[in-house]
Image (cartoon, helix red, strand yellow):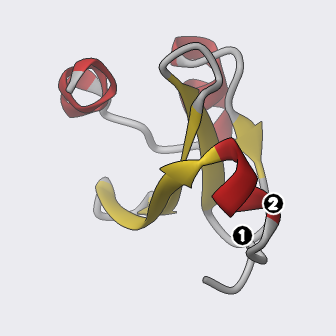
Amino acid sequence: MAWYREALKGDWSTSNEVKAQFTSASILRDGRVVFNIAGNKYRVVVWINYAYRVVYIRFIGTHKQYDEIDAQII
């Protein structure tokens, strides 16, 4: 919930703005971003439509579950 509340405050038009707010975020290609949450216990993979400032959650899971997916295509 803490990540969600922080993400609601975001009005990101570029990946640099995401990185400024969440320094541990990993920026992938094509608007994909990986967030470490709960002390890196969980990962959230999102796709951000920067033009419309919309965040689509594509995956939420443990670090182990994240290792089993391809964050770029999920």
Looking at the picture, does residue 62 appear above or below residue 74?
A: above
Residue 60 image offset from top left, x and y in percent: 44, 56
**Side (left or right) of 35 relative to 13:** right
Q: Nearer the viewer, residue 50 or 55?
A: 55
Q: Is residue 32 left or right of residue 21?
A: right
Q: Which mark is residue 67?
A: 2
Where is residue 68 shown, x and y percent of the image? 78, 71
Instruction: Say above or below: 27 vs 40.
Output: below
Secondary structure of the residue carrying numbered label 2 = helix
Q: Which amino acid type is shown beneath numbered disc 1?
A: Ala
Q: Residue at x 45, y 57 (%)?
A: 50
Q: Which mark is residue 71?
A: 1
Total numbered labels placed on residues in the image:
2
Q: Residue lying farthest bottom?
A: 73
Name the amino acid, label 2: Asp
Q: Are marks 2 and 1 in contact (CB under 8 Å)?
A: no
Give residue 47's mark: none
| Quadrant of the image occupied by residue 14 | top right
Q: Looking at the figure, which quarter contains the N terminus?
A: top left
**Which residue occupies the foreground of this view, 7 or 15?**
7
